[in-house]
Image (cartoon, grey):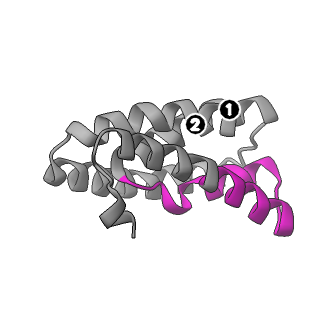
Amino acid sequence: MVLGAVPAAIVGALIFVDLDAAFIHRLLGAFILLMIPARRWATRRALTIRRWQLLPVGAAMGLLSGVVGTAGPVNAPFFLAYGLVKGAYLATEALGAAAVHLTKSAVYGRFAALDTQTLA
């Protein structure tokens, strides 16, 4: 998942730096609204995720996180469909989030979207 998420987070962060804040809010709202029927559809079909499928899922989540700031709990259905529970789920989510957020912070800092005063 991280192999797909980190490069996509770089691209998403670069897009974020140039986007209008109002557009980002609308994009995030539309994505969240679309996740409701998508999750219900996936639950009805008892979809499962294979290991290789986490790469494109990671890329999509990294890009989304870079563009709108964070993907939040959007990863959860994919990790659960893969079969992760308890500690494995928490550790995977934490590692993925840390990798993506550190990457985005570096990109934001490089393009003056995040300075030391803001970081402090």
Quarter of the picture containing the N terminus is top right
Q: Is residue 70 magenta?
A: yes
> Is residue 95 found inside the magenta-colored segment of the image?
yes
Q: Is residue 39 left or right of residue 87?
A: left
* The C terminus, quarter of image: bottom left
Q: Is residue 46 left or right of residue 113?
A: right
Give the x, y percent position of residue 12: 39, 37
Is 44 placed left or right of 46 in the picture? left
Q: Nearer the viewer, residue 47 or 86?
A: 86
* Above or below 14: residue 84: below
Amino acid type at image mark 1:
Leu
Q: Secondary structure at mark 2?
A: helix
For the point 74% across and 50% down, the residue is 81
**Residue 87 position within the rendered picture, expressed as x and y whole percent measured from the top left:** 85, 67
Residue shown at the point (62%, 31%) measured from the top left = 4
- Disc 2 marks which residue? 6
**Residue 41, above or below 89:** above
- Picture layout, residue 25 above or below residue 52: below
Q: Residues within 10 Å of mark 1 (few under 14, many from 20)?
A: some
Q: Main secondary structure of the magenta part?
A: helix
User: Mark 1–mark 2 contact, CB under 8 Å?
Assistant: yes
- Residue 1 appears anywhere in the view: no
Residue farthest to the front, as pictured: 116
Q: Secondary structure at mark 1?
A: helix
Q: Which residues are magenta?
A: 69-97
Q: Residue at x 24, y 50 (%)?
A: 24
Q: Which residue is mark 1?
A: 3
- The answer, for residue 85, to whether it is visible in the render is yes
How far apart are the two marked residues, 1 and 2, measured between alpha carbons?
6 Å
What is the three-letter code of the residue carrying label 2? Answer: Val
Residue 52, image x and y in percent? 76, 29
Q: Residues within 10 Å of mark 2 (few under 14, many from 20)?
A: many
